[in-house]
Image (cartoon, helix red, strand yellow):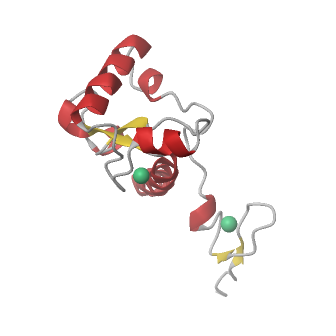
Amino acid sequence: MPTRPPTRCAEPGCSTLVPKGRCEAHQRIPWAGRDDKAARYGISSGAWRSLKAKVTRRDNGCCYRCGIDQAEIRRDDPEAPDHVLDHITPIFEGGSATDMDNLGLLCEPCDTLKSKSEALRANQARKRAR
Ligand SMILES: [Zn+2]
Ligand SMILES: [Zn+2]
């Protein structure tokens, strides 16, 4: 049987060759468009806000990956997006949704990177389950 030639990534305009589907950079994020973590895990938005306030105080508003301080970004760019509250170990990998030890702040670039790599792992986990 001939082996299947690699194809281009399914993302329009991307020419990365892949065995099938999408390249690493264009994995679909299963929860794209529903970026409301609180709703996803059944946490009320009020509870989520107060968790975020607690984590912000605990970590002095710093991103837990790169250490950048939310207030510092704001000083440079008042329009900059807020850090987001993030589950350090994703829920789908067994992390706790509300445990303070599993919560941290992420700046926007770090959140984007982490979401992508989690989407990749989630997609792979689903494939394995089939
Ligand atoms: Zn691609
Ligand atoms: Zn960061």
* Looking at the image, residue 45 lies above or below residue 70: above
Q: Residue furthest front?
A: 75
Residue found at x 51% / y 46%: 108
Towards the viewer: 49 or 125? 49
Q: Quadrant of residue 42?
A: top left
Residue found at x 44% / y 44%: 72
How many numbered dots are placed on residues in this image?
0
Residue 88: give x, y in percent of width and height: 30, 44
* Looking at the image, residue 107 lies above or below residue 101: below
Is 50 on the left-hand or right-hand side of 7? left
Residue found at x 70% / y 68%: 9
* Looking at the image, residue 11 lies above or below residue 38: below
Is 103 on the left-hand or right-hand side of 78? left
Quadrant for ligand 1 reads: bottom right
Residue found at x 55% / y 42%: 30
Towards the viewer: 60 or 86? 60
Residue 20: give x, y in percent of width and height: 65, 69
Residue 106: give x, y in percent of width and height: 40, 44
Q: Residue furthest bottom?
A: 2
Towards the viewer: 1 or 52? 52
Quadrant position of the N terminus in the picture: bottom right
Q: Quadrant of residue 96?
A: top left
Is 88 on the left-hand or right-hand side of 129? left
